[in-house]
Amino acid sequence: MEWKLKKYFRPKVKREGAMVLANTMRVLSKDLFSFKRKYSFGAVKKTTDISYRRFKRRILSRRSTEFPVASSPMTTRWQHSYITENDTVCQRLPLDSPPRSTSLTEVRLGDQETLPTPDGESPVDLDKRGWDVSAKSLLETSRECNRGQSDALKVNEQDCIWKESEGDENRSSTPLPFSIVDTAPSMPCSVFKAEWQMAVPGLQDDYYLNLLAWSEQNVIVLGLASSVCIWDASTQSLQGSLQLTAHTSDLFGPPCCPRVSSVAWSKDGQTLAIGKSDGEILLWDVERRTSLRKLTGHLSSVGSLSCNQYILSSGSVLGLIHHHDARVARPVVGWLRQKKGICGLAWRPDGSKLASGTTDGLLSIWPDDPGATGKCLPMLTISHPTAVKALAWCPWQLEEVAVGGGRQDGALRVWDTHTGLCRQSVQTHSQICSLCWCPANEELLSGHGLPQNQITCWKMPSMSRKAELYGHRGRVLHLARSPCGTRIFTVGSDLQACMWKRSDRLIGPQEDADGHCCEN
């Protein structure tokens, strides 16, 4: 019975479905014919084809050039041409890349620039005799540039303002930066003795930032939120702070104030470089309290800075490394490219190599080529299980670089960049946030996270534990040593900073009774 019903109803269903489909097609064809007559469908189709061909031509031209496209947090292999065109189909986006130019030769180090320089010399002549940029020469250069015809070189004083120290800390209910806290570190060490424990309110608990630097002039700078505090270690006093000002947002909304993402001193300790979360870099003469220049090129957070004579290298979250020369009109003279964000950057002490660490665990060694382009490949690439943020070159073994592992790794490794082999390795079972070498006693200091948040002193080359310092209740994010090597300064995520002084005998420089460095 069931079979007979299926045989009866199946042809009927097919006939009804075919009739419905035919009626539907008839209605659609009628509507399409009326639409063609009313709106001239052929002209619309022709315009669309022209726009698509134009769009395709733009994409192909972009892929044939050398500059990276970084319009998204993930770096792609597409390329971008730096020609501004009024195209209604494919508009040019501001990208994290070198400034606009018609050719690569305009941003190379060896090309002639119209920028006036001291004593009437060209940048090429200054480069040949190894001219090292000081704060005074940078100030004179920036003033001459401001008198010139390039408006892009003018320094906007409103980007960062100097703020004097507030003096007595008892006037405020909240602790001021670098104000001494009464509580002392819990466990003193026989090698290092704790001198002070200070408050650093507003410190960003971000593993990938580099917010501490100690200059050759014995001045400590620390980035706290949207300000950079300047503390003189010789007089043990807070000189003042540099406050970043708010910018008007491009969208409809209140003005937003960028944050400090990295700081670095020049080799002579007179010029301070400040990396911001909006991609800009500010150069300041701290002694004269004068803004020297603003460097642009990044459109993402500048997480790391490193100086090599007249070259300032910066690394961004989008994986680009820019080489800046503040003496020329277009400061970005070269750039390198990585797939992931740059969280560690350090020039070798002799300036012959550059080490960079990325968030995906790559340690790359680059040659000393300030005019390099994105096609330049690293001399050596070493993969790690976690992000390479804590890295430092050995001052006496120049081919060695120390790298600290993250939370999932916890290993401290010393690599030979000449052979690519691991010289020493030790498991710490904790996150390594910061590293610092002490050449006077041939030691390596490492700042750790959980579970103990300690500072460990390693005796080299045996890499044996010499001492452990306990003074923080949070991970030790930043670590720096004094120019004479007798003190170290640590900053933790517990919003506390500690000053430690060596209590054992030094092999190298020591301090006299007035606290100044002297040779032993």
Image: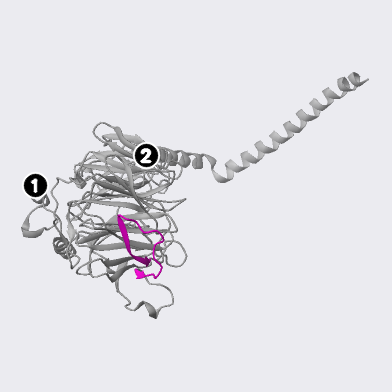
Residue 484, image x, y percentages: 20, 57
Q: Amino acid at mark 2?
A: Val
Region rendered in magenta: 178-199
In 3D space, how far apart are the residues under numbered discs 2 and 1 (Cα atoms)?
43 Å
Q: Position of residue 244 (x, y in %)?
A: 34, 66
Is residue 171 visible in the rendered structure shown here? yes
Front position in the image: 32 or 11? 11
Above or below residue 197? Residue 69 is above
Circle number at residue 426: 2
In the rendered structure, are the residues bearing label 2 and label 1 in contact, judged by CB atoms less than 8 Å apart? no
Indicate left or right for 358 with 330 as reference.
right
Task: Give whichever of discs 2 and 1 has the lower sequence position.
Answer: 1
In the picture, residue 51 is in which quadrant?
A: top left
Amino acid type shown at disc 1: Lys
Q: Which disc is residue 128 wearing?
A: 1
Q: State which mark lies toward you, 2 or 1.
A: 2
Q: Is residue 195 magenta?
A: yes
Residue at 30% from the left image edge and 74% from the top image edge: 165
* Res 298 visible: no
